[in-house]
Image (tube, grey):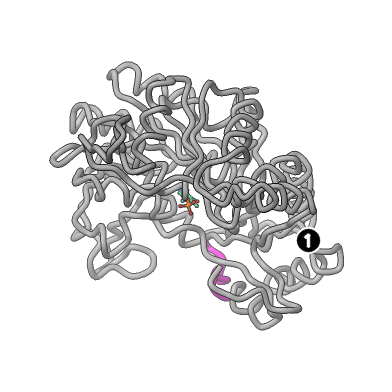
Amino acid sequence: MGDSMAEGRVYLSSPTMHGDEQRFVKEAFDTNWIAPLGPNVNGFEKEIQEYVGVGHAAALSAGTAAIHLALVLLGVGPGDTVFCSDLTFSATVNPVTYVGARQVLIDAERDSFNMDPASLRKAFEIFGRPKAVIVANLYGTPAKLDEIKRICDEYDTPLIEDAAESIGSLYKGKQTGTFGDIGIFSFNGNKIITTSGGGMLVSDHEEYVNRARFLSTQARENERFYEHKVIGYNYRMSNILAGIGRGQLLHLDEHIRLKKKIYERYKAGFADIAEIEMNPIPDDCRPNYWLSCMTIQKECKVKPLDIILALEKANIESRHIWKPMHMQPVFSKIDFVTADGKVWKGEDFEGSDENGCSNGKCKDISVGADIFRRGLCLPSDIKNTDEIMEEIIGIVRSFFAK
Ligand SMILES: *Cc1c(COP(=O)(O)O)cnc(C)c1O
């Protein structure tokens, strides 16, 4: 999170270790499996496979590496197009640039903050078939995965599910990460379970996962000498970190339970404040509640930054909702599709204020920009005590006191 683990500071979401992690790591030391292969790597893959109910899994050095390899596996290359969630962390879309392809960004919907199926359909109608679609499940809440998958199938286009934030979440009773042709998870330090850094690529297609393992270990052919027919990567997870992951996975359900309590505590704490809305949870899913987020009513004078700064003063970490990719300077020229079927370019937003307006005309009417401008992520660390939760709720409430 950029900050060191300073005493007394309240974090957005910091690692929570239990002791089981050290047991697996000690085993790795005792048997000298200090390598990007070994029993913890195999064990972690198998245990994730079983937990999420997917055919195959490859443990990798990061979630970003997993998305990169997913694109390589699907043959995405220079000149290709990939439709991507717009309201997300940059790691969802950066790998598209790594392979020389071009993103088309798809607006969000308000029910889950994730990719809007109507905008996705528009993108297919306007741009034709892309090489792949990448959908992210933000803050642990699943996207409308059925609808998105159906549209992709209609156009015979593979779907990559970025479940970096949503491991353990259910959509219509099925684990996230299993809806796409390829799914990815992240075990970065701030995620609901962590290996300090790491990721996983999962799929029911064995050939994808075998190929991912091959490519992630430098694409070395099965020869006595080092033989390479394609470009490889050094993306495998180490046996030490996989040990941390095995220990963490034993506590995923417990983490979800505690994260849910945090969400419900905030919801109850703000129930009487009309200006505050918690991030929506659709009926057909059971999120992992990774981060609790709130939005402030449009007409309200209070802005997310006011609350973020007040919490910061009390040494409490919070942050803005992900800034949509179409608003990022680095993607200023990238096409962006909103549900009204409009295609926007970066230049369309140039010179507009924080409300997307300039010269009395409001340019950016996207849902993602609106959620970003009105939203913030509240401290969601499962180690936070009742006392700390009360303090946070009190600080937020003070802005809305009648
Ligand atoms: C964390 C995250 C990633 C990247 O995962 P790393 O393991 O940090 O590389 C990708 N997508 C989303 C939505 C994320 O939150």
In the rendered view, would you say 256 is above or below 320?
above
Asked if the residue at label 1 sits under 8 Å from ligand 1, the reply is no
Locate the N terminus by quadrant: bottom right
Could one spot residue 138 in this view of the protein? no
**Residue 360 percent across, percent down from the top left:** 28, 66
At 74% from the left edge and 56% from the top edge, which residue is drawn?
Answer: 17
Judged left or right of residue 327, residue 99 is left
Q: Give the range drawn in magenta.
A: 299-306
Determine if the magenta segment contains residue 295: no
At 26% from the left edge and 38% from the top edge, which residue is drawn?
Answer: 82
Q: Which residue is labeled 1 in the image?
A: 383
Crowd class of label 1 (few under 14; some 14 to 19; many from 20; radius 10 Å): some
Instruction: Identify the residue at the far right of this view.
Output: 387
Count of numbered tags? 1
Determine if the magenta segment contains residue 303: yes
In the rendered view, would you say 266 is above or below 287?
below
In the rendered view, would you say 180 is above or below 251?
above
Viewer-nearest residue: 180 or 363: 180
**Residue 84 percent across, percent down from the top left:** 34, 41
Magenta residues: mostly which secondary structure?
Answer: loop
Instruction: Identify the residue at the far front of this view.
Output: 224
Dividing the picture into quarters, in which one does residue 270 lie? bottom right
Look at the numbered disc 1 and give the secondary structure of its residue. Answer: loop
At 66% from the left edge and 53% from the top edge, which residue is drawn?
Answer: 29
Q: What residue type is labelled 1?
A: Lys
Judged left or right of residue 263, residue 335 is left
